[in-house]
Image: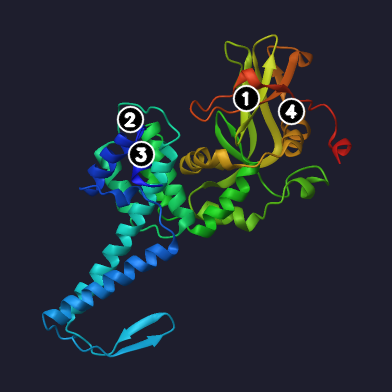
Amino acid sequence: MEIKDLAGFAEPITKLIEVVAAGCGRVTRSYFARKDAETKAYEMKVLAQTEYEIKQLYGSSDSVREIQLIGTAEIDNTNPPLLERASSRNEYQEAVRQQNLESVCAIAAEDLLHESQVPEEKPSQEWINRFFNSAEEISSEELQFIWGKILAGEIKRPRSFSLRTLETLRNVSKEEAEIFQNLSSYIASTRKGGILPAPGNFHSKHVDFLFEVDDDEIRSLVDAGLFLDNQAEMHYTEIFNKHGYTYLKFGEIALIIVSSGGGGVVLKSKSKYYFLTKAGSELLRLISDSVALHTTYIKYVIANDLYSESIIAGCSEGSLSFFLAPVDNKTGLPNLNEKTPFDISRPYEEEK
């Protein structure tokens, strides 16, 4: 994205510029231009060449350098003084941090281009400080994408991501983020938070066909602070709202449970579930627009597990209807105008 593309999107981008300025000081157009790996490498090469030419001009100790190439690293055999070595290291590290911040901000800008307006409120200075101190250390493109979405998400909905979540996510590795992305298709968002069925706890022999999850992968996400360190049975009440429905979210899709008699559904299961932490739930909300939908998996979990074990409170069993509807990205609520009937009564074997 070029800086000229920012024209016509004053409110969201202006808010982003204000936040970047509060965290980084003077803002340049480089914060809003996505760069590929070749461009980043070229910038670092120019930096190194400029540093070398300045030192030659002023007659520094390495004006005649002896360079040895080992792998992709250049080794300077002239062994300059300690302060020069420290200065060179600091300049390089700060340049890398600057590239990281610019990449993250450019991703946020691209995300905000799709918005027509954002709230007047902006993130707190404490949040801004913590965010940019963390984002400058993020070098992989996969994690930069997540941090760019966090920045855009906080501008669109202030207080969406807590300071504790930032602290957790700064320690999440690229591999752990990829595992979480893969598992996200199987996580249901409930009023109590995100739930993920624990491997090996279902009663159907067909679970391996539907649910390809490795317990070791889940354990790695427990260690990363995205899942709670225990398994538990599901047992809580989903109360129908004043419109007579409640829902579970699976990525961009909501399973809507409609009652003609009010009351609520007590969701309980003999199977074990992992529960997301606050950081895990906030990360799930961030990537939900890229989650693949498995309607057969939804049918299995609801019909063969949760629903088959549930107690209908305040209404007769036959008064419940089920629908699928897309989730509105801005409100996080299901779009009832686009709901379609969803039959969960047929056993799984008929689906194969």
- Rendered view: 106 above or below 48: above
Q: Amino acid at mark 4?
A: Tyr
Residue identifier under label 3: 6
Q: Quadrant of the C terminus?
A: top right
Q: Which residue is mark 2?
A: 11
Comparing labels 4 and 3, the label whose residue is closer to the camera: 3
Indicate the secondary structure of the residue bearing disc 3. Answer: helix
Kindly tell me whether residue 243 is visible in this rendering.
yes
Q: Amino acid at mark 3?
A: Leu
Residue 273 visible in the current orientation: no
- Residue linked to disc 1: 247
Q: Closer to the camera: disc 2 or disc 3?
A: 3
Residue sitting nearer the eye, 284 or 190:
284
Task: Verify CB contact (< 8 Å) between mark 2 and mark 3.
Answer: no
Label 1 and label 2: CA atoms lie apart by: 33 Å
Mark 4 sits on what residue? Answer: 307
Circle nearer the N terminus (4, 3): 3
Most distant residue in the front direction? 4
Element marked by disc 1: strand
* Secondary element type, mark 2: helix
Q: Percent position (x, y) of residue 11?
A: 33, 30
Q: Earlier in the sequence, mark 1 or mark 4?
A: 1
| Residue appearing at x 56%, y 39% in the figure | 288
Question: In the rendering, at what x and y percent does residue 28 appear?
Answer: 26, 49
* Frontmost residue, 323 versus 248: 323
Q: CA distance from mark 4 to mark 3?
A: 49 Å
Residue placed farthest to the top in the image?
261
Could you tell me the amino acid type at mark 2? Glu
